[in-house]
């Protein structure tokens, strides 16, 4: 590829949230995209190196990890969520609820599969039901269309 220009990508502009926790000898930093609610980067740096970085020394050594790299495609997109209720045969069958949530969830949405709070299961005149939160991440300019 000699002589060819390298392809460049347009940077994604992100509004980020930064969280730091301090101990006597370490600083832990987490970075989250505000729109998508995805925490995607965790860093850990020694206190002495952190102090050096704050004083203007560049390229201080630290360790880090990209968290849930499969979520990186969600960065910069708007996080939307809504409640999703569906019929089940018997109350509080978590295995059945998980499989039905995955099967019945509208296209483009992802169901939470925890089913661990007081509103996860219930019964009304129509029978037993399970309920969870479904989520999606859409381009900011896309219209909000909830199922």
Image (cartoon, helix red, strand yellow):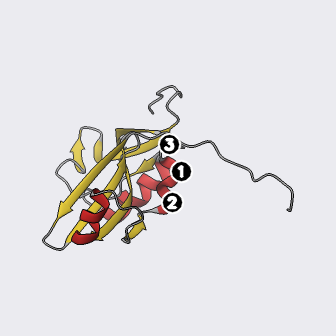
**Does residue 107 appear to the left or right of 85 in the view shown?**
right
Q: Residue at x 37, y 39 (%)?
A: 81
| Circle 2/circle 1 CB separation < 8 Å | yes
Badge 1 marks a residue whose secondary structure is: helix
Q: Which residue is mark 2?
A: 70
Q: Which residue is mark 3?
A: 106
Q: Position of residue 6 (x, y in %)?
A: 75, 53
Residue 78 position by quadrant: top left
Give the class, few, some or many, for how many residues have Cα within 10 Å of label 1's Cα (few <14, many ≥20). Answer: few
Q: Residue at x 23, y 71 (%)?
A: 48
Real-space Cα separation, disc 3 to disc 2, in angstroms = 20 Å
Vertical placement of 37 versus 4: above or below?
Answer: above
**Residue 73, disc:** 1
Vertical placement of 140 versus 91: above or below?
Answer: above
Give the class, few, some or many, for how many residues have Cα within 10 Å of label 2's Cα (few <14, many ≥20). Answer: few
Indicate the quadrant containing the N terminus: top left, top right, bottom left or bottom right: bottom right
**Does residue 36 appear to the left or right of 128 in the view shown?**
right
Q: Is residue 88 visible?
A: no
The tag earlier along the polypeptide, 3 or 1, is 1
- Of residues 14 and 124, the one nearer the viewer is 14
Q: Position of residue 142 (x, y in %)?
A: 53, 28
């Amino acid at each position: 590829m000699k002589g060819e220009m390298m392809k460049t990508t347009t940077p994604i502009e992100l509004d980020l949230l930064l969280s730091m926790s301090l101990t006597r000898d370490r600083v832990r930093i987490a970075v989250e995209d505000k729109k998508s609610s995805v925490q995607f980067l965790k860093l850990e740096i020694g206190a002495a190196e952190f102090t050096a970085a704050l004083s203007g020394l560049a390229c201080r050594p630290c360790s880090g990890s990209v968290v849930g790299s499969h979520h990186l495609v969600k960065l910069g997109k708007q996080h939307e969520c809504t409640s999703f209720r569906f019929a089940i045969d018997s109350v509080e069958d978590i295995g059945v609820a998980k499989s039905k949530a995955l099967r019945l969830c509208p296209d483009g949405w992802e169901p939470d599969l925890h089913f661990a709070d007081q509103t996860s299961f219930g019964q009304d005149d129509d029978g037993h039901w399970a309920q969870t939160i479904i989520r999606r991440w859409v381009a900011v300019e896309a219209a909000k269309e909830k199922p």
